[in-house]
Image: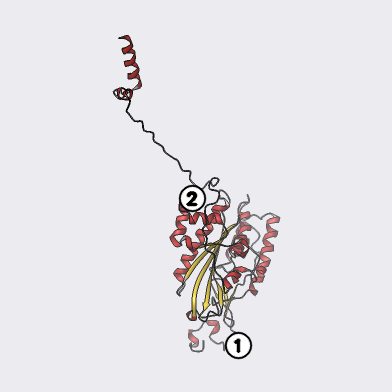
């Protein structure tokens, strides 16, 4: 800031002496940037009385939370689940919602005050990426009856291999369809979202990535991705094809639900739980020095009961050898009626 002329600085920084005063927060795309600590935070003041608790007012309040990188995606998910309940109610856009929905909405809004204490470092990891030995991207997917989720982390190994640092890159949570989808199908949709997130991150990150790995806690989905023998119905076939456009089966791995950070984004948490969760810090396994996945194959599970697998129809052809004299005589006739007529005529003679 010292090398910039005051006229080129932001209006609220033009007359600020950074050596004596505390610089004001800078706001951009819904995030507050603390210049002094170089951290991001989110400040939101819920409006639960004005506008009133109607469909229109709740939607306006929910859309005021803008989170492009997914820092608070699990928190916003809680509000979206509540709004889904509201949108299904037979009331108008300017009618008051029932008391039980209103109380749940007020409780969720009151927890948003605690987002102001959340501080996220602007840098992905403390170490300079140019001074690192290896850089990896690890992406996790998960689903629940509420939502599908994908989250990406950067794993950096320093040149001397003395430290491993993990930083949050980006996360996404989307509401699950309400009807017509089984859990395996939703897990497959989460895997598709995971590969789309990987393609987006790799396109915009300005550094060399040595390896990309994907994780899911669904062995059924891993069986779909690794499959080389069976054919699936259209829904699974299309999504497996989209997954393989941005990844290979060898990049996919299994992780338990307890160690999967995407489980948080698919179920949602409150704002006070976010700073200490795996969502921002990443799973513990990525921070281990001896972290190494066991290579294994993932076969299809319950192939006889899985309705997504096409049945194999066997077509057989039977060939008769025309070596007997009877076959030679039958071949002269074009229909069974002609054969019977000829036999009756022979008996009369």
Q: Nearer the viewer, mark 1 or mark 2?
A: 2
Identify the element where label 2 is drawn.
helix
Q: Position of residue 225 (x, y in %)?
A: 49, 56
Q: Residue furthest left?
A: 332
Q: Position of residue 98 (x, y in %)?
A: 68, 54
Question: Considering depth in this image, is 94 or 4 the residue closer to the camera?
Answer: 4
Which residue is denoted by mark 1 in the rendering?
21
User: In 3D space, how far apart are the residues under numbered discs 1 and 2 (Cα atoms)?
Assistant: 60 Å
Residue at image x 58%, y 53%? 183
- From this view, report whether residue 320 is shown above or below residue 175: above
Q: Position of residue 25 (x, y in %)?
A: 58, 79
- From this view, report whether residue 258 is shown above or below residue 340: below
Is residue 210 among the parts visible in the rendering?
Answer: yes
Residue at image x 48%, y 56%? 226
- Residue 329 sits in quarter: top left
Identify the element where label 1 is drawn.
loop
Q: Position of residue 321 (x, y in %)?
A: 34, 30
Is residue 48 among the parts visible in the rendering?
Answer: no
Which residue is denoted by mark 2 in the rendering?
235
The reply, left or right, for residue 246 in relation to residue 144 is left
């Amino acid at each position: 800031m010292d090398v910039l002329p005051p006229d080129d600085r932001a209006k609220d920084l033009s007359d600020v002496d950074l050596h004596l005063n505390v610089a004001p927060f800078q706001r951009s795309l819904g995030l507050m940037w603390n210049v002094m600590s170089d951290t991001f935070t989110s400040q939101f003041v819920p409006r639960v009385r004005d506008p009133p608790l109607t469909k229109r007012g709740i939607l306006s309040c929910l859309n005021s939370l803008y989170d492009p990188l997914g820092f608070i995606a699990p928190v916003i998910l809680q509000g979206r689940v509540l709004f889904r309940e509201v949108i299904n109610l037979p009331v108008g856009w300017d009618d008051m919602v029932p008391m039980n929905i209103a109380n749940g909405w007020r409780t969720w809004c009151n927890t948003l005050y605690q987002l102001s204490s959340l501080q996220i470092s602007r840098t992905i990891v403390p170490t300079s990426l140019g001074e690192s030995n290896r850089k990896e991207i690890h992406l996790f997917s998960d689903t629940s009856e509420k939502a599908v989720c994908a989250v990406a982390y950067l794993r950096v190994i320093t040149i001397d291999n003395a430290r491993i640092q993990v930083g949050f890159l980006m996360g996404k949570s989307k509401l699950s369809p309400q009807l017509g989808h089984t859990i395996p199908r939703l897990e497959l949709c989460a895997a598709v979202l995971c590969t789309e997130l990987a393609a987006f991150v790799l396109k915009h990150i300005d550094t060399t990535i040595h390896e990309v790995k994907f994780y899911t806690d669904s062995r059924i989905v891993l069986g779909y991705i690794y499959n080389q023998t069976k054919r699936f119905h259209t829904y699974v076939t299309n999504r497996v094809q989209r997954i393989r456009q941005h990844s290979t089966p060898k990049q996919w791995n299994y992780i338990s639900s307890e160690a999967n950070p995407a489980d948080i984004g698919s179920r949602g948490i409150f704002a006070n739980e976010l700073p200490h969760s795996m969502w921002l810090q990443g799973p513990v396994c990525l921070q281990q020095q001896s972290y190494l996945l066991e290579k294994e194959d993932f076969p299809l599970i319950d192939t006889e009961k899985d309705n997504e697998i096409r049945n194999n129809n066997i077509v057989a052809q039977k060939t008769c050898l025309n070596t007997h004299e009877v076959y030679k005589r039958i071949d002269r006739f074009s229909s069974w009626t002609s054969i019977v007529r000829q036999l009756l005529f022979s008996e009369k003679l």
